[in-house]
């Protein structure tokens, strides 16, 4: 991690700790430092991991769309850990890396289809406080995806918000997953304030 977290990491110990470390190494190639922060409350970490495992079994909505939506929510919230992981996973799962790296600046990019743009807009609208999802956007997505996929996408973005907001609040930042694969850096959001 590039900075100090707001809650200090602790050693991951015990039988469940061994399971967590084994699972993490298999998934990420290492035990993320951030798990030591979450290990301060193993029950919370366990719930988070269980939600991630169970939601990975949902298949009503296209995986690419869900990945893009997760990264859009993380970008809006400012979770560099989630963006780094999302880009790393896009590489490992064979997703379109050009599109994945353009998520932070999707509004200015020309690589996304109209459906993908609607999904990205929906993810951002859901991630606002309060949410700014419109009837028109929901209707377009319902028409294009169908009810099961839209419900899944909505829950997926809600979970992305849980993870991204938790990490951002705790000061958990990128751990260099994407860089370890030699991936080019993610595109940067245009700084609207400096453009004015």
Image (tube, helix red, strand yellow):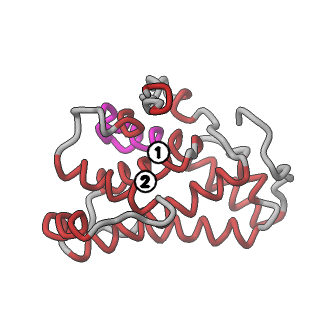
User: Residue at 54% of width from left, 27% of height from top?
Assistant: 179
Label 2: few (<14), some (14–19) or many (≥20) C-alpha neighbours in 10 Å? many
Instruction: List x then y, in percent, for residue 44.
Output: 70, 70
Q: Is residue 58 left or right of residue 61?
A: right
Locate the N terminus and report the quarter of the image it occupies.
top right
Residue 181 position in % (x across, y down): 50, 28
The tag earlier along the polypeptide, 2 or 1, is 2
Q: In which quarter of the image is residue 46?
A: bottom right
Residue 64: percent from left, percent from top: 30, 50
Q: Mark 1 points at which residue?
A: 86
Could you say which is closer to the camera, residue 31 or residue 131? 131
Q: In which quarter of the image is residue 186?
A: top left
From the viewer's perspective, is residue 160 above or below residue 148? above
Give the vertical position of 10 relative to 1 (above or below).
Answer: below
Question: What residue is disc 2 on?
Answer: 70
- Range of residues picked out in magenta: 86-100
Is residue 47 part of the magenta span, yes or no?
no
Main SS class of the magenta portion in the image: helix
């Amino acid at each position: 991690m590039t900075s100090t977290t707001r809650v200090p990491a602790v050693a991951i110990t015990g039988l469940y700790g061994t399971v967590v470390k084994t699972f993490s190494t298999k998934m990420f190639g290492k035990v993320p430092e951030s798990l030591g922060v979450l290990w301060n409350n193993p029950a919370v970490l366990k719930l988070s991991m269980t939600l991630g495992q169970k939601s990975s079994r949902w298949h009503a909505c296209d995986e690419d769309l869900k990945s893009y939506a997760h990264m859009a929510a993380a970008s809006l919230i400012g979770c560099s850990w989630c963006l780094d992981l999302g880009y790393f996973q896009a590489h490992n799962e064979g997703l379109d890396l050009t599109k994945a790296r353009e998520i932070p600046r999707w509004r200015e990019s020309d690589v996304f289809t109209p459906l993908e743009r609607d999904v990205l807009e929906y993810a951002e609208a859901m991630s606002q406080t309060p949410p700014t999802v419109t009837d028109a956007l929901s209707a377009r997505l319902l028409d294009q995806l169908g009810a099961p996929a839209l419900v899944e996408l909505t829950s997926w973005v809600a979970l992305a918000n849980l993870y991204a907001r938790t990490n951002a609040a705790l000061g958990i930042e990128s751990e260099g997953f994407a860089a370890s694969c030699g991936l080019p850096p993610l595109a940067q959001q245009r700084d609207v304030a400096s453009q004015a």
